[in-house]
Image: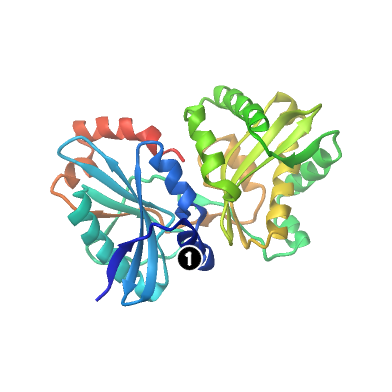
Amino acid sequence: MSTFKQCQDKQEWDEFIMENGGHPLQLWGWGEVKSANGWKAYRLFLHDDDVIMGAVQLLVRKLPLPLRSLAYVPRGPVVDDGNREELLSSLADYVKKNHHSVVLTVEPDSIKYSVPKDWRKSKTRVLPARTIVLDLKKSDSELLSDMAKKTRQYIRKSASETMTIKMVRNKLELDKCLSLYHATAKRAKFDLHPDHYYYDIYSKLEDHSQIFAAYVDDQPVAFLWLAISADTAFELYGGVDDLGQQLRSNYALKWHAILKCKEWGLSRYDFGGLLEGGVSTFKKGWAVDETELAGTFDRPLSAAYSIWSKGLPMAKVVSRKTKKLFKR
């Protein structure tokens, strides 16, 4: 009979995630980031005797009564198709018994995804299902040919400008990027986490956090922040200032990051989602097709799920309170 066992060993956990095609948001460091910011992370191996059948990093967040808590799996679990339904069913039982959550929500890193019959497709998402995913096994010329003509032109133009692209290596350089990010958020009118959240990502994801920046006169004019696993690069954040926009620096910067990920042996580059607006217009120029992931799946675990899912006044209040917590 299969059972869940908590993993307490960071190296053992990350090795399994990396060796089995897991997403960066299933790595130990991402759980540490969320644990420092209101969630609690549980790393669970599903065992059948001594054989590990799959793994899931489960995030749990307390909610007001009668909802009690929310259980969430970002871009997971990490399990093969043959053991998926058993893991999901066992996970629902585990969460209900140990955390009394109103719902267990999973957002797999898959295009096609089957779930047990007592699960349902959710209308409420955490991470966007629509995205751009580049196949890094393609040659440079193949990737370029898949882009819009204007994107290729801007890559060449921005690469010829007087700027330097390099990795962000210390907190002083990170602070400069965060200042740029604040300016970007103010201009584009979106909310940010407190700065300590970004410092947590930088320190706790360690080598799985990679930040590239384009500099003019030793000041960043654009930056791009990735979380990486063995196979996947996942865009977390990015920003560009007025000078960077004039120089089209974000084009040369993104192409540089893509080529670096190819060099490191990664096979997928995920643009982190498509929303409405100028940023998504920019992203769509990099590929012929969009990628539609399977989406968000819920396993109701409490009679209070109807409050959560139907948007009654209490659920609306909770949703407003948790909206910022869901930001990656």
Viewer-proximal residue, 40 or 260?
Answer: 40
**Which residue is located at x 82 percent, y 34 percent?**
163
Q: Read off the residue under disc 1.
A: 16
Q: Quadrant of residue 26?
A: bottom left
- Res. 284 in view: yes
| Residue 235 percent coordinates (x, y) | 57, 46
Q: Is residue 159 left or right of residue 101?
A: right
The correct choice, above or below, for 91 with respect to 234 in the image is below
- Res. 127 in view: no
| SS class, disc 1 | helix
| Residue 76 percent coordinates (x, y) | 41, 58
User: Label 1 is placed on what type of residue?
Assistant: Phe
Q: What is the quadrant of the N terminus in the image? A: bottom left
**Which residue is located at x 51 percent, y 44 percent?**
204
**Which residue is located at x 52 percent, y 65 percent?**
21
Q: Quadrant of residue 181?
A: top right
| Residue 73 percent coordinates (x, y) | 37, 53
| Residue 309 percent coordinates (x, y) | 24, 44
**Which residue is located at x 39 percent, y 57 percent?**
8
Question: Few, some or many C-alpha atoms within 10 Å of disc 1 (few <14, some 14-19, many ≥20)?
Answer: some
Q: Quadrant of residue 107?
A: bottom left
